[in-house]
Amino acid sequence: MEIIDSHCHLDDSSFAADFEQMLERAEKAGVSTLLVPAIQASGWAALQQLCQRYPQLYPAYGLHPMFMPHHREQDLTALSQRLAQGHAIAVGECGLDFYIPKPDKQRQQQFFEAQLELAQQFRLPVIIHARKAVEQVVLTLRHFPGLTGVLHSFSGSQQQAERLIDMGFMMSFGGPATYANAHRLHSLIAWLPTNSLLLETDSPDQPGAAHRGQRNEPAYLPEVLHAISSLKGIPAERLAEETTANARRLFNLPATLTR
């Protein structure tokens, strides 16, 4: 089976000691393509170099809402310049996070909307982080018709998912789907149309039930695949084929690794 990890932070320092081995494990697990979204401007250049070195890695560039103290207004200009180079498969990781202590909601909103505008300008999808802020994200996206993208590690309601699907957005799921007590999430995944679904690990974060407390990595993605295929009552091979097609379509990925 070929599967795509639609969200993994492989530029994280936790992978430095065994990066090559980590990629080998992913390849053996059938994870053929890995999408790596950035979180800060300071990491964009290194991410580009990493993805140029490994053809199975594809970069997205953005400013993550959890790191607002590190972001500057000029980062938005720099993001526009980087997107103009044509290497990015998406804008992100961007979005809103109202879970963190004392979130600066106004500034988060400002940076989120600025990145959505850039996504429209460069005709790229967006990779969105929404924690305790799904409704505000949905309301914001209504002002950007025609934009597409994915809400990663989706935690909203079925009603919110329906509205996002109507706007052309997908939802991705990772390790949390493997936990036996995640009943609300399981119900949502079982209902969600397969053509709106992506798989992810969010490595090195959000490990699945079999790796609780450990570093997460793309080689564990088949565990997410099998958990979701069981929830939806469809063969894992079919789910792999459909979610891979979804990712290729959304991010305009080539059919092979040559680029």
Image: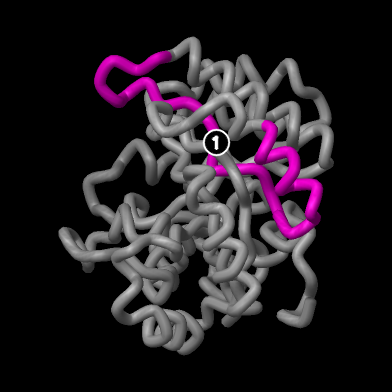
Q: Is any atom of residue 199 visible in this view?
A: yes
Task: Tell me the quarter of the image containing the C terminus.
Answer: bottom right
Relative depth, front residue between 168 and 180:
168
Look at the numbered disc 1 and give the secondary structure of its residue: strand
Indicate whether 20 appears above or below 102.
below
Residue at the image position 73 percent from the left and 62 percent from the top: 248
The x, y position of residue 8, in whole percent, is 47, 59
The x, y position of residue 247, in whole percent, is 67, 59
The x, y position of residue 105, in whole percent, is 44, 13
Horizontally, residue 207 falls left or right of residue 169, namely left
The residue stretch that appears in magenta: 77-104
Horizontally, residue 14 falls left or right of residue 12, namely left
The x, y position of residue 161, in whole percent, is 57, 31
Relative depth, front residue between 109 and 7:
109
Indicate whether 155 appears above or below 104.
below
Specify whether residue 87 is painted magenta.
yes
Horizontally, residue 220 falls left or right of residue 147, namely left
> Badge 1 is on which residue?
94
Residue at the image position 62 percent from the left and 15 percent from the top: 139
